Image (cartoon, rainbow, N blue to C red):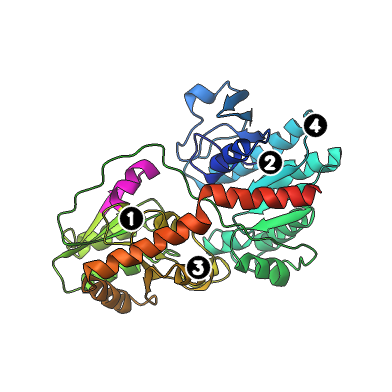
Amino acid sequence: MVTQFYYPERFSTTDIAEELVRLGNQVTVLTGRPNYGYGHILEEYKNIKEENINGVKVLRTKLYPRKYSRLSIIRNYLSFHRNAKRYVRKLDDDFDIVLSVSLSPVISIAPAIKYAKKHSVPHVLYCQDLWPESTVVTGAVRKGSLVYKILYKWSRNLYRKCDEIVISSPSFKNYFNDVLKITDKKFPLVYQPILNSKAQLEPVVYEKKHNFVYAGNIGTLQLTSELVEAMQILKRDDAKLYLMGMGTNLEKIKKQISDGNLQDKVEYVGALPIEKAERYYKNADALIVSLKNDGTVGKTVPNKAIQYMKYGRPLIGVIKGDAKDLLEKANGTIFSNENPLQISNVFSQFCDISVKEKAQMGLNNKRYFDEYLTAEKLTNQLFEVLKDFKK
């Protein structure tokens, strides 16, 4: 398995690898030295080249730490791409199959392609992020620019070299077919597993009667400014919105709260690990999943939509596309369009729903999660794809 991000960095790659071990497989992971979210290589990992974590053999290659500037992020991406490719040249272990997991950037799958070609081993990509689409959506690259054209050609070339591509959202297939012009693969669907919590902490005790929680990227794409504006419009003193996470919109959000004197209606809690964030989930009246309906990324399923369902709470969805389709099947979400006034109206409507009906919505979400979306069930689906492809 090739992935740039692995424990102690908090990504689903770790849970996937460990679950594959629990299914009876021998798993080796080629990854970098942990730095994501820290701004530096963790001190205890500076000299570690190989370790065993919960039955997974983890190989660590050097890379430039991801700091907080765009240049450092580019250097981080390129250093893993270069050093991991160099690492696989001397890696002669006898593997049945290579699995790469692509978050950002897609160039992180190049070492998997190189190893698979050298040893004539099947290579399956588990695609959890689209390139170059993600660079456009985040504003890093302008569509049609020279940089976009270079990234498009590079991304398409890497994707075409994969033997199979497992997609984590149905709309990904349309992007591969229509934008990247890749039509010679089956694109089996396996939703991205959620992060497993490592501790069970007591839930937060809220002061207000109605409490809404948003956790995740504080960005423009996630409509966080619209959520705050909706709370400003809301004419109720018994409701409050809790925000947690990091992102490009964070300073704007803080200013919105301050300028609007909204401290009693909106609270930014900070960037919390899942163990602390779930303290807010457990007693929330509703968990909010929001995503701007813009491009292919805006049609996909944010991982938090699945994460939220685990806690048996009702959801408020400011979302379209694949995520709305999935949440409608669970029947535990009330939906709004992206307009702050409409979001505010939905907040108000939700406050007036009976306790019994809210409990049923939460129960519907939990039942659907347990039946279809646990990490064990999703990894089993992925394993079946790997087994079928190996045959």
x, y percent for residue 113: 77, 45
Question: How far apart, in angstroms, are the residues tagged by discs 3 and 2?
Answer: 34 Å
Residue 81's tag is: 2
Q: Which residue is mark 1?
A: 251
Does residue 66 show up?
Answer: yes
Secondary structure found at label 4: loop
Secondary structure at numbered mark 3: helix
Mark earlier in primary sequence (1, 4) = 4
Name the amino acid, label 4.
Asp
Amino acid type of disc 2?
Answer: His
Q: CA distance from mark 1 to mark 2?
A: 32 Å
The numbered disc on residue 94 is 4
Whether residue 292 is situated above or below residue 193 in the rendered picture: below
Residue drawn at point x = 61 percent, y = 67 percent? 170
Tell me the CA gap for discs 1 and 4: 50 Å
> Seen in the image, is 7 located left or right of residue 160?
left
The quadrant in which residue 117 appears is: top right
Start-end of magenta stretch? 268-280
Neighbor class of circle 4 (other Cα within 10 Å; few <14, some 14-19, many 20+) is few
Tell me how far mark 3 sits from mark 4, CA to CA. Answer: 39 Å
- The one nearer the camera, 261 or 192, is 192
The CA distance from mark 3 to mark 1 is 32 Å
Callout 3–callout 4 Cβ contact below 8 Å: no
